[in-house]
Amino acid sequence: MAWRKRVHIKKCNHQLVFKKLVAGDFAANNAGKYAGHMCERTIGRMLNARKEKPFRQVSHRSALNAQLPADTVLKKLLKNFLHEDLGSVGDVTSNAMISARSKVTAYVVARTAGVLAGARLVELLTIMVQPALTVRAMVRDGERVRKGQKVFCISGSLRSILLLERTMLNLLGRLSGVATFTNAFVTEVQGTKARIRDTRKTTPGLRALEKYAVVCGGGVSHRAGLFDAFLAKDNHVAGLTPQRMAHDIHQAIIAARHQYKLKFAMVEVDTLDQLDALLRLPNGVIDAILLDNMSLITLRKAVALRDRLAPRVQLEASGGVTLKTVAAIAQCGVDFVSVGAITHSAPQIDFAMDIQSAPRKRASS
């Protein structure tokens, strides 16, 4: 029947979870510097040990503010991911051992707890591999999954399910890991006005997906790349006095706004003198200032200076941010804290495929 040719997602409308990584005029996050690399085991212990601070449940509305790229873009990515695993001949083992007529029901099960991200990719993968497969989502992106919980139910050709299994589980594990680690930082800053932002420290080829996962975890996203926002960093202004820096930045932003459609204009500083000079520029020139690697005392002074000279300018703290330090940084009064670790050091969430019924029929030629 025709209705069997379509993939069915019963519990959520993932078509709503699409395209706007940046919420508001300046919902950004900078390429913050993450110092103090922690091993995956250490991070895992920290995540599992916070009984007094459970994971913050992300509302579906929070996930709706994010957008994945268009399906045409996603399918190009997924085609490359599938080719990496299948080459030009497919699954030689399943083709030799499993009948093309074998039908099964399989469940994707979470082996570790976390926050889900990537449900739309599961839907698209099943369509691309075998349109006759049916998939039912049992959890929505941005929702918490328990260890042992069934997340998806997929029915249809056993060969087709095995064909997409590893690509699907890898993507779910990676994106849900980013969402989960982001959510741990979001939980730590509850009670402050600070929000957690991502950076450009992403996996090549996965940036849009990982930034989507950040929003599923309750964070907000920075610029998509070098092309959509003005962000002058230390290497752009090296050797300039604070006053000369402010002058050059002013002229550069005027030129950039004239030539490009910018999401925002932002400047990185590492001293209060630089901050003071920038805050004295005309209102509306700079949207936000990045406070890089400042001590807690300096951060408080920076917030007080901003409140006095230019209260509309947003402040973002970055550099060396960990789960142990993020709460104290947020309590200084900054608007955002950027954390490179949520994408470059997120532990994987483990998912498995459980086959419920698999008739043992010999492969037919």
Image (cartoon, rainbow, N blue to C red):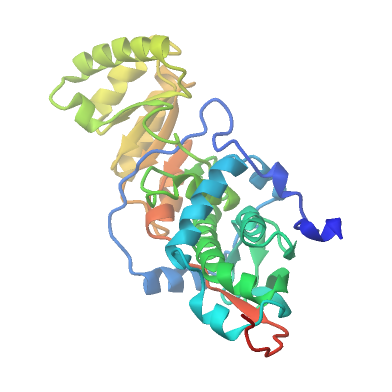
Image quadrant occupied by the C terminus:
bottom right
Residue at image location 21% in from the left, 15% down from the top: 243
In the rendered image, the vertical position of residue 330 relative to residue 289, given as above or below? below
Q: Residue furthest left?
A: 239
User: Is residue 75 visible in the rendered structure shown here?
Assistant: yes
Q: Could you tell me which residue is drawn at 70 percent across and 57 percent down?
A: 140
- Residue 336: x and y in percent read 46, 39
Q: Classify 195 as above or below 156.
A: above
Residue at 41% across / 68% down in the picture? 43
- Nearest to the observer: residue 2 or residue 146: 2
356 lies left or right of 305: right
130 vs 167, left or right, is: right
**Figure label count:** 0
Residue 321 position, x and y percent, is: 36, 51
Can the viewer see residue 331? no
* Residue drawn at 31 percent across, 52 percent down: 34
Does 77 sit above or below residue 90? above
The residue furthest front is 365
Where residue 297 appears, as percent x and y from the top left, is 32, 41
Front one among 247 and 210: 210
Image coords of residue 71 (percent x, y)? 61, 43
Position of 80 compared to 240: left or right?
Answer: right
Which quarter of the rendered picture does the N terminus lie within? bottom right
On screen, residue 112 versus residue 132, left or right, reads left
Nearest the viewer among 303 and 8 is 8
